[in-house]
Image: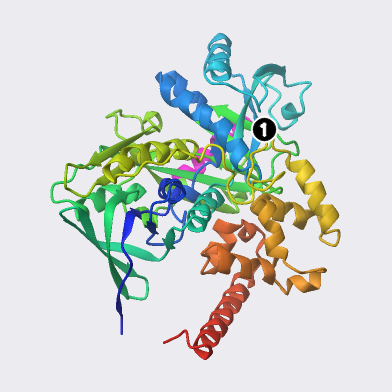
Amino acid sequence: MPTLSILPPCDLLIVGGGINGAGIARDAAGRGLRVLLCEQDDLAQHTSSASTKLVHGGLRYLEHYEFGLVRKALQERETLLQLAPHIIRPLRFVMPHDAAQRPAWLIRAGLFFYDHLARRRLLPASASIRLDTHVAGRALKPAFKRAFVYSDGWVDDARLVVLNALDAFEHGARILTQTRCSFAERVDDHWLITLRQRDGSSAQLSARALVNAAGPWAGEFAQLATPNPSRGGLRLIKGSHIVVPKLFEHPFAYLFQNPDQRIIFAIPFQGDFTLIGTTDVDYRGDPATVAIDADEERYLCDMASRYFARPVAPSDVIWRYSGVRPLLDGETGDASTVSRDYRLQCDASPGVAPLLHVWGGKITTYRRLADEALALLQPLLNVAAPAWTATKPLPGGDFDVLGTLSAVPDFSAFLARFQLRYPWLPDSLAERYCRLYGRRAERLIGEAKSMSQLGSELVPGLYEAEAVYLLDNEWATCSADILWRRTKLGLHCLQGDVERLDAWLTLTSEHRISASCEHGDGG
């Protein structure tokens, strides 16, 4: 029978385990607030794992005169490259010039602004190149003679969410996945909250403040929490991506301008693949069931084929994913031009418990959003603590000295030290561990001194030690959590692999429940 429990009160209850919710949880917990974050599914299961996986200023936003957003994003790009150098890394983009689209002088002017709108220390400036002599030109049609190169960053988006949640947890926050906020009522200076878990059990608690970071569900949650809510002017936009076998061997990415004035990216992905996206389509369905349609898939293939010497066909696609972006509605007709900025709406008055709505946003600016959220909430909670997240690495990102921030993080040097310490690890596995977990890879390996001590290989590249680490430390509960959000090993799975992992997870769960009962912890 489902049970009802009473949880300790908290200062801040955050609804939504995407990047904004996890970022706010990390910031608030680090300032000493009692924080609880609830997520109805897995961390980053929806919008925050369905991005193009870039930390970028948004070069195309300059055309819409969003200079403030671009500057803010460029500043954060520099910060994030230092905070998580294992999961965020520099990436050079090649933009072939098509004279029928934008004139060269306009592109040069835009890149000049992009280079200089914010201080840039870690990334090289833009440049003009000849495609007939540059390695990136080999994969393109010979009709393209000239290109521009500029810098941005690549990010493992789902892991960025998990690392923020992990840091929040290590600062005292409670993180509850598979848990939905089913009831929220203001009672004078606090909120009375009911949380419902996937198994039907529920819990009640009180919170001094409530944060609505529910992403594409933010409007729906606003209706639950307040009788006459503002929906924040959200516009739900579907963005879809495809993954194909790699189309080029070099480390550059591409930005392609298309005749409809939209752009798509083609990005090196997981070593053996190329990621192509994204689309921008208005969406009115359930965000939990969003999926790419045939028209979107054809569009991405056609636009990529316009540039690549080797055509891309729907039959080449080995993985596809879609997400719903909750964007600020500027009442523009074209979904691709809707602003990626955010707005924080704080509903508060003396003696009344605050409610903070998070409308819109993008991965690159999540940390700044969280900082601004705390600036609004702290005075209302009679708390004064300094901002701190801009200078403290995310878990695993402290390559050089524990707890400090290197001016120029050197992943290659860290990987070399790691390989010297664990010479028995295959190079590819050592690099993957370092990329995903950074310094925390040492915790994953534990006392193991050989491959056999990492346990059985559950699916290609996944050994028991890593799976156990993810179950124990990163809120993974099922094969999809492990294969698609904590890692991308699902791309390498063959027939029957997922079923074998599911069977191992079931057996492991049964053993844990049995051990818990034997120790008197199972009630």
Q: Is residue 25 left or right of residue 317?
A: left
For this orientation, the residue located farthest to the left is: 227
Q: Write down the quadrant of residue 92 in the picture.
A: top right
Q: Is residue 424 left or right of residue 195?
A: right
Magenta highlight on residue 305: yes
Q: Write down the quadrant of residue 11 in the picture.
A: bottom left
**Which residue in the protein does label 1 denote?**
407
For this orientation, the residue located farthest to the top is: 105
| The residue stretch that appears in magenta | 295-308
Residue at left offset 31%, top offset 62%? 9
Percent x, y of residue 189: 19, 52
Q: Nearer the viewer, residue 240 or 197?
A: 197
Residue 235 visible from this viewpoint: no
Q: Is residue 450 left or right of residue 463?
A: right
Residue at left offset 50%, top offset 44%? 51
Callout 1 secondary element: loop
Q: Is residue 32 left or right of residue 303?
A: left
Residue at left offset 62%, top offset 37%? 82
Give the amino acid at mark 1. Ala
Percent x, y of residue 136: 72, 29
Predominant secondary structure, magenta span: helix
Query: In the rendered image of this protein, does residue 110 appear above or below residue 272?
Result: above
Q: Nearer the viewer, residue 24 or 66?
A: 24
Q: What quarter of the picture does the C terminus occupy?
A: bottom left
Q: Nearer the viewer, residue 372 or 462?
A: 372
Q: How many marks?
A: 1
Magenta highlight on residue 496: no
Q: What quarter of the picture does the N terminus occupy?
A: bottom left
